[in-house]
């Protein structure tokens, strides 16, 4: 039984770093953000839905007009919700198809909005990557060259971190106090055995 495992965490939690460690262990990872960008350019049904909501300017020369769309949704939560409501179902479909084609004991879907998008219900387990808020802010400011306010604004759009971790089946602590690799290896072994058992915890 191929288990479908979600991997989530707030901005700056280090979930991509954790995903890369799973990849080194031979586990295929589906990166939802990258996939969404690809699908928004490739999926004709989705392109039509985006143009219907945001106008023809949403695409330029057949490619998604990111600057135009970002300007529309970043300052308007309602517009962002509309965009997510058409993109999330397409990404969930694409991830389900991709996961069904994998041959490993388990596969991972890395996504910031696993619970918010409704994709948790299509997964067997969800792993949360936890880091304290101040550390997440510092990491994101350094990585994305953003101001403190810009980072906190983005964080406020996401589900509360403590609430998110409570919804997860497993939590990896990436807080500079715990070593991450041993946690991933331990979880990897657990998921391998759960896949053999073919059951949920």
Image (cartoon, grey):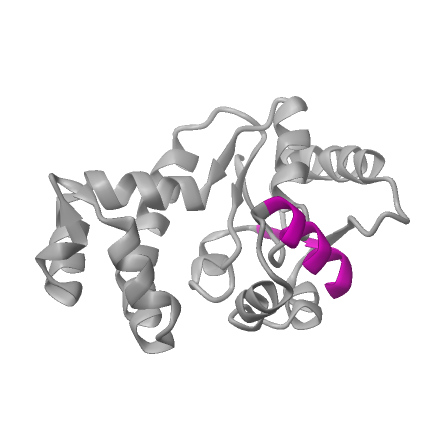
Q: Residue at x 39, y 29 (%)?
A: 101
Range drawn in magenta: 125-143
Q: Is residue 15 left or right of residue 172?
A: left
Q: Report whether residue 132 is seen.
A: no
What residue appears at the point 50 percent right and 58 percent down from the top-left corner?
Answer: 114
- How many circles with numbers are drawn on the protein? 0
Asked if 26 appears above or below 176 in the picture, the reply is above
Q: Quadrant of residue 54?
A: bottom left
The answer to which of 143 and 27 lies nearer the viewer is: 143
Nearest the viewer among 53 and 151 is 151
User: Which image quadrant is residue 98 in?
Assistant: top left
- Depth order, front residue of 181/200: 181
Q: Is residue 32 magenta?
A: no
Residue 147 in view (yes/no): yes
| Above or below, comparing residue 130 to residue 100 in the picture | below
Does the magenta portion include 126? Answer: yes
User: Of all residues shown, which one is farthest toward the right?
Assistant: 177
Residue 190 is situated, as x and y percent measured from the top left of the image, at 75, 39
**Left or right for 98, reference 39:** right
Image spot of residue 32 (x, y percent): 44, 45
* Picture coordinates of residue 75, whole percent (x, y): 38, 72
Which of the 4 image quarters holds residue 39? top left
Report x, y in % for residue 83. Answer: 29, 63
- State whether residue 20 is above or below residue 95: above
Q: Image point 35% across, 75% down: which residue? A: 76
């Amino acid at each position: 039984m191929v288990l479908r495992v979600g991997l989530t965490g707030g901005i700056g939690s280090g979930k991509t770093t954790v995903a890369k460690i799973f990849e080194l262990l031979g586990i295929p990872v589906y990166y939802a953000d990258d996939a969404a960008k690809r699908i928004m350019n490739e999926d004709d049904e989705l392109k039509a839905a985006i143009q219907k909501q945001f106008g023809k300017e949403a695409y330029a020369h057949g490619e998604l007009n990111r600057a135009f769309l970002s300007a529309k949704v970043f300052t308007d939560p309602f517009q962002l919700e509309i965009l997510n409501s058409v993109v999330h179902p397409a990404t969930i479909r694409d991830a389900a198809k991709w996961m069904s084609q994998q041959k490993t004991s388990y596969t991972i879907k890395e996504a910031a909005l696993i619970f918010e998008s409704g994709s948790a219900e299509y997964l067997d387990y969800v792993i949360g990557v936890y880091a304290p808020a101040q550390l997440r802010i510092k990491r994101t400011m350094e990585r994305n060259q953003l101001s403190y306010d810009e980072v906190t604004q983005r964080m406020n759009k996401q589900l509360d971190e403590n609430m998110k971790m409570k919804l997860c089946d497993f939590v990896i602590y990436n807080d500079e106090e715990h070593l991450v690799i041993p946690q991933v290896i331990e979880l990897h072994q657990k998921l391998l055995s759960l896949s053999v058992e073919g059951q949920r915890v």
